[in-house]
Image (cartoon, rainbow, N blue to C red):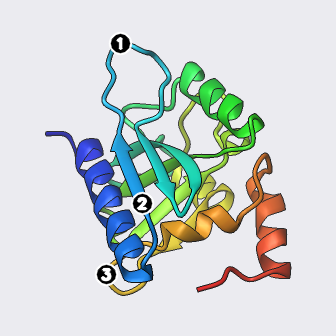
Amino acid sequence: MSDESALVRNIVRHVKATARDRGIGCFAWNVSDSFSLGIPDLMIIMDGQVMFLEAKYFSKIEDNKPLLKHTFSAIQVATLKKISMSGVHAFGVVGSRSIPGRLHLFTPWDIPADGNFDYEYLKNYSIQMNKEGATWPIHRLYQLPVKRTRMEMNKEIAMHPPLR
C-alpha cells in the first residue's frame, strides 16, 4: 500500500469523523479507477456539497529540489479545472510525513505547469490546513469560493473567517 493511498484513507477517516461530530450527512468515495486517466482520487459529499481531491504525497524535504515523486499530471490538473469551472470544489492535496498534521491544498490554477514544486512553492502557494484536535477541518473548504486562485481565496478568508 502506497503512502498516497494511506493519505487518501486518512482524509476519508477525518471527513467521516468531522461529519459524525457535526451531525451532518457525509459520503466519501475513494475513486480507484485505473482505467480513466485524470479522475481525482477522492469524491466527498458533505451536507449536500460536493468536493473532489487529487492526492499526492512526498516523503522528505530537500532544499531547492522537487518534492513529488509522482507529480500532478496535465490531465489531472485539467480535470480539476473542469470540475471547478462547473461550480464544484476541486483541489490538489499534498501530505507528508515530513510535516505531520498538515495538509497543503492547491486550487487547480495554483498547481505548477510541470505538476511539481519545491518546498518554497509549497509554503507560498498552498492553502495550509492543520489538524484541529484529531481531525483536519476539511468541511471548511466548502466555505471557500469556487473557481478562484489561492491568493483570491486567502483574501476572501480574511474578510469572512470560516465558521466552526
Query: Residue 28 versus residue 66: which sits nearer the camera?
Result: 28
Mark sitting earlier along the chain (3/1): 1
Q: Splitting the image into 4 quarters, where does residue 114 fall?
A: top right
Amino acid type, residue under disc 1 in the picture: Phe
Q: Is residue 51 above or below residue 101?
A: above
In space, the residues marked 1 and 2 are separated at their CA atoms by 26 Å
Residue kind at label 2, given as amino acid type: Cys
Relative side of 124 to 12, left or right: right
Q: Out of 136 and 48, give the one closest to the viewer.
A: 48
Instruction: Residue at 72%, 63% (x, y): give it.
Output: 144
* Residue beneath disc 2: 26
The quadrant holding residue 80 is top right
Residue at numbered disc 3: 134
Label 3, secondary structure: give it. Answer: loop
Q: Mark 2 falls on what kind of element? A: strand
Could you say where residue 73 lies in the image, as x and y percent from the top left? Answer: 52, 24
Q: Between label 3 and label 2, give the one nearer the viewer.
A: 2
Where disc 1 sits, the SS reads loop
First in sequence, mark 3 or 2: give its number: 2
Amino acid type, callout 3 = Ala
For mark 1, what is the residue?
35
State the mark number for residue 93: none
Question: Earlier along the polypeptide chain: callout 1 or callout 2?
Answer: 2
| Distance from Cα at disc 3 to Cα at disc 2 | 18 Å
